[in-house]
């Protein structure tokens, strides 16, 4: 018998079946807000620890070289090691994320970072020091690649804002470690080993909330339905997403002009950044600036990325073409290099400001990674491609600069090379900033 178009079985099923749950975006209340707060906190803590392993070394590089017996070429290799590790280990991040989930891989990366930082401070010779540094950098590599993916999945409507948050915090971490390593070394008995080893404690503390928040990460990942979930972007004209869950397949990135332009731009801005991280303190010290002041100058260079890192990605996300912004940042880098050549000591603080502004090419590159693909899957593949290829491109940079410095006995030739690379960075960044998507086959 039917009643109002329903059979008896239909009415029974309606009574016994649970009502469908509303989508997460429709859920309101303390639980939802608490999970979102955990996700934001997790990104901040991870970002805070993405740079101290590198930036803490520059201010005491002279002491490390003397103690371990490094020549200029090996020191150049040490400053190139981050790029090498980021390029090699970054390729593995998307595959690991598909198997274990991106949050679990980031947690494993933080563990590797903690262990590597702790062990390298104990190493008595160069080779073990390089090996344990590699372990730490491998942990950073997977975080570098997966942070844009987590932003795309957890905050698809806030790509520019959240990219700015973690890029700014990463810059803050670099600045604090650069500024504090020399004072910590002095306070800990003039031991550079303790001065750089203390950052392992900071990473270990940052790891604890990640472990505590794993259930929130699992719910967020299940809610997004895998690597392709959360495709909608809503922040600014450059955000090109449509909000549809059905995204076009991602073609081979090796055939994409947009992907290659972004990879080369990423590589050149990374070259400039790691040359600055590895050698800026030495440039200032060679000009007669004291070690402590040189560390503060490097901290200023890296620290400007903090406040600017919160703003620049939001500006970039609202631009249809990020080329003009890339050009402005590159011009600041050229001014900084010219100042280091003409008056490195008397204008040191001014040149540090210009170099700090130029370093904001990094959050712009991260923002463009999020904008040049339509889906989280596309962002994951583009992030791995652009960062891995880019870091491989930048490997020779710090090594070449170190070799030129030792061969010429000064900074004139290295600075000229750095300026030439910055000019190329501007040109290729304009191409990478075009309003294109890798799924469109361009």
Image: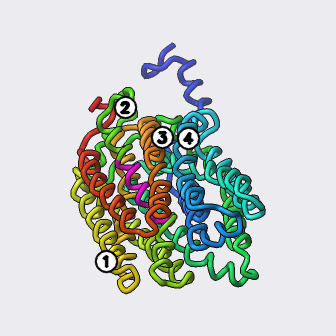
Location of mark 1 (residue): 342
The first of marks 4 and 2 along the sequence is 4
Q: Disc 4 versus disc 2: distance between alpha carbons?
A: 29 Å
Location of mark 3 (residue): 384
Callout 4 secondary element: helix
Q: Disc 2 versus disc 1: distance between alpha carbons?
A: 52 Å
Viewer-side label of 3, 1: 1
Where is the C terminus found, in terms of image quarters? top left
Q: Which residues are magenta?
A: 265-277
The first of marks 3 and 1 along the sequence is 1
Image position, residue 107 (x, y; %): 66, 50
Picture quadrant where residue 180 is located: bottom right
Location of mark 2 (residue): 247
Callout 1 secondary element: helix
Callout 3 secondary element: helix
Q: Nearer the viewer, residue 184 or 317?
A: 184
Placement of 88 over or under 266, stated as above or below: above
Residue count near mark 3 (Cα–Cα under 10 Å), binned few <14, some 14–19, many ≥20: many
């Amino acid at each position: 018998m039917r009643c109002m178009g329903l059979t008896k079985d239909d009415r029974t099923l309606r009574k016994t079946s649970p009502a469908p749950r509303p989508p997460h975006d429709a859920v309101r209340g303390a639980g939802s807000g608490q999970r979102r707060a955990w996700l934001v906190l997790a990104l901040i803590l991870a970002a805070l620890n993405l740079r101290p392993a590198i930036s803490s070394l520059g201010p005491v590089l002279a002491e490390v070289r003397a103690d371990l017996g490094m020549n200029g070429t090996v020191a150049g290799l040490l400053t190139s090691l981050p790029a090498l590790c980021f390029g090699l280990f970054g390729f593995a991040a998307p595959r690991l994320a598909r198997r274990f989930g991106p949050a679990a891989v980031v947690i494993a990366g933080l563990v590797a970072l903690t262990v590597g930082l702790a062990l390298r401070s104990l190493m008595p010779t160069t080779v073990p020091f390089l090996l344990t540094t590699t372990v730490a950098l491998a942990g950073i590599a997977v975080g570098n690649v997966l942070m844009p993916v987590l932003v795309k999945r957890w905050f698809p409507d806030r790509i520019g804002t959240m990219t700015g948050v973690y890029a700014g915090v990463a810059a803050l971490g670099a600045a604090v470690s650069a500024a504090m390593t020399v004072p910590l070394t002095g306070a800990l008995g003039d031991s550079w080993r303790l001065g750089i080893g203390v950052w392992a404690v900071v990473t270990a503390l940052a790891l604890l909330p990640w472990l505590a928040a794993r259930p929130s990460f699992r719910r967020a990942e299940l809610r997004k339905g895998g690597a392709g979930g959360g495709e909608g972007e809503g922040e600014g004209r450059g955000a090109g997403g449509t909000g549809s869950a059905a995204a076009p397949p991602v073609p081979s990135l090796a055939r994409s002009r947009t992907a290659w332009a972004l990879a080369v731009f990423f590589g050149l801005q990374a070259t400039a950044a790691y040359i600055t991280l590895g050698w800026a303190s030495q440039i200032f010290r060679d000009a007669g600036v004291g070690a402590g002041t040189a560390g503060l100058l490097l901290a200023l260079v890296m620290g400007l990325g903090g406040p600017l890192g919160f703003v620049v990605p939001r500006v970039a996300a609202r631009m249809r073409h990020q080329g003009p912004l890339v050009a402005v940042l590159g011009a600041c880098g050229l001014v900084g290099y010219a100042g280091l050549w003409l008056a490195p000591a008397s204008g040191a603080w001014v040149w540090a400001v210009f170099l700090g502004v130029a370093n904001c090419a990094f959050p712009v590159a991260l923002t463009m990674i999020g904008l040049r693909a339509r889906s989280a899957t596309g962002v994951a593949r583009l992030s791995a491609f652009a960062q891995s290829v880019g870091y491989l491109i930048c490997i020779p940079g710090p090594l070449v600069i170190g070799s030129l410095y030792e061969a010429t006995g000064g900074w004139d030739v290295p600075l000229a090379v750095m300026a030439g690379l910055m000019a190329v960075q501007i040109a290729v960044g304009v191409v990478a900033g075009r309003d294109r998507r890798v799924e469109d086959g361009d």
